[in-house]
Image (cartoon, rainbow, N blue to C red):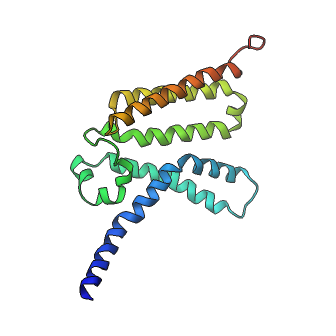
Amino acid sequence: MAKTYKWLEKTGKGLYKTLFYMEILIILIEGYLELIIATFLQIQSNIVKYYWISFFISFVIFIIMPMIIFYIITRKKECLEHGHIKDKFGAFYAQFKTDNKGNLIYYFMFFLRRFVFCMAVFTTYMRKHGGILLIMLCLFFLGAGMYVGYFEPFKERRENKLELMNEMFFGCHLYMMMCYTDFVLTGYG
């Protein structure tokens, strides 16, 4: 009986270290765009009853997650590979090379790009001027493509190539979409 109790206690401590932080962080990373969209839609709606949910999600997304990224970027390589930081925040950098600090900035760019995209979609100025929105997004995707091409942040070469190809295709689609905005003079489209 004592052996089982020790095993349960050890398992419980392990779950406390990894499960809570890792699973929540993975959900926040994967659902970042959806959470931003839901937050903006909730704030723009007239339902006052559920504002606290929007403000809580906004606080987590816009304050807590950048602080975690900054905390991870400022740690030494040895701390990232061993210890409690890997147990709690390993979901942020498990698939990245940790030999260079530039590799760890990937999620910062990832979050910033999606935030700018949502801000552009949900603000009325950008809805009226679609050409400016597309130019901003093209510049972000060009910068992200240059970042992935230079740093190659992922451990696997295949993932680096897939991410670079994704950036290139999305950039090409954005350039083609400019023909349907106010960027083109009236009568020429």
Residue 86 occupies quadrant: bottom left
* Total numbered labels: 0
Single out the residue that lies furthest toward the right. Answer: 187
Q: Residue at x 39, y 64 (%)?
A: 19
Q: Residue at x 33, y 42 (%)?
A: 96
x then y, percent, for residue 173: 59, 25
x then y, percent, for residue 83: 25, 59
Q: Is residue 136 left or right of residue 105?
A: right
x then y, percent, for residue 25: 44, 56
Q: Is residue 109 left or right of residue 17?
A: right
Q: Is residue 150 left or right of residue 163?
A: left
Q: In the depicted view, which residue is nearer to us: 20 or 119?
A: 20
Q: Residue at x 25, y 40 (%)?
A: 99
Q: In the depicted view, which residue is nearer to us: 143 or 70?
A: 143
Single out the residue that lies furthest toward the left. Answer: 78
x then y, percent, for residue 47: 74, 59
Q: Considering the image in quadrants, where does the N terminus appear?
A: bottom left
Work out whether 186 lies above or below 171.
above
Q: Considering the image in quadrants, where does the C terminus appear?
A: top right
Single out the residue that lies furthest toward the top. Answer: 188
Residue 105 occupies quadrant: top left
Residue 88 occupies quadrant: bottom left
Work out whether 169 lies above or below 84.
above
